[in-house]
Amino acid sequence: MAMAPGKSFRKGLTIIDLMEMFPDELSARKWFESLIWADSGRHCPHCGCTETTECNMEKSHPQPYRCKGCKKYFSAKMGTVMEDSPLPYRKWVLAIYLHMTSLKGVSSMKLHRDIGVTQKTAWFMLNRIREAFKRDDDDEPPMGGPVEVDETFVGGRARNFSNAKRKTRKEAGVGSGTTDMTVVVGAKCRESNEVRAEVVESTDKATLQGFIADHVDEDAKVYTDDLSSYAGMPFDHETVNHSAAEYVRDMAHTNGIESFWAVLKRAHKGVYHKFSVKHLQRYVTDFAGRHNVRDLDTLNQMEAIVAGMVGRRLTYKHLKADNGLPSGARS
């Protein structure tokens, strides 16, 4: 029997299924609680006490639960990226669903129309969802390989600027081409299909080989293009000569990581239209994270997002802060 197109082995979830699963706010809240408190049970995020009581929300209690120890009120949102969010749990469910079921992501303009919030709120929600994909270096063992590594440039080109802006930049001595674009380096493990990617400041040898050393097992086979920065690596290393129009030679190619770049670029042009340098790492982390769970059923993907929300916090002030560098940039 012929295989169905796409990842037909996954169990999807229609919008009708979603509404039947979460017919009201209580069902959505209980779902979040079952995931957030899966390991330790319901407990007070203020003091850790497990002696808690459920409040009668109809009597205008500020939160659904109260701790018998410290006497404070709390909810499952505390200690997650949803902390201090006044939005109903059902809107968080819908936002997660729409983002995870869109291959190229969902824009804040579309989300604000779909779930009935302002565009500013939708943008904040999406960035909090992206925060759930962040991983500490200690949580990421090196990839065993074979591993494909490649770099790409993201952003607008100077040649697309207006004549007035190009004149101003020329007078200031600023170049064109990729000089106005941001470098992203990525690695894809052929065995696990996992992708890792980082915003970096240059394509020099120390930067690119440093990324590989951080993410790839020393015994892994590494495939790259013929960029000189990859030369002399302490790995079993093979290249393809893109400058001579060589893209595949036996097992040597970087087609896997390049297909990941293709999705990122199409999202950039077709959904978001612009990735600011300041927030680019958030988008890169998001696309890598969604790629890495795409073989899961839709509900399992959503559960993975909620699990990743725990222990993380992103305030609007921090999100808007301009630190002069993309988050996580490798210098």
Image: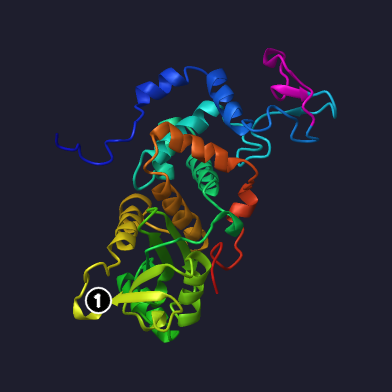
Question: Which amino acid is tagged 1?
Answer: His
- Horizontally, residue 89 falls left or right of residue 67, namely left
**In front of the other: 27 or 59:** 27
Q: Quadrant of the C terminus?
A: bottom right
Look at the image and say whether residue 186 sits in the magenta stretch: no
Residue 165 in percent (x, y) is at 38, 74
Residue stretch in magenta: 49-66
Look at the image and say whether residue 51 sits in the magenta stretch: yes
**In front of the other: 14 or 301:** 301
Q: Quadrant of the N terminus?
A: top left
In the image, residue 278 above or below residue 159 = above
Number of marks in picture: 1
**What residue is drawn where x is 60% and y is 57%?**
138
**In front of the other: 120 or 15:** 15
Residue 140 in percent (x, y) is at 54, 56
Residue 247 in percent (x, y) is at 22, 71
Residue 29 in percent (x, y) is at 58, 24
**What residue is drawn where x is 29% and y is 35%?**
9
SS at mark 1?
helix
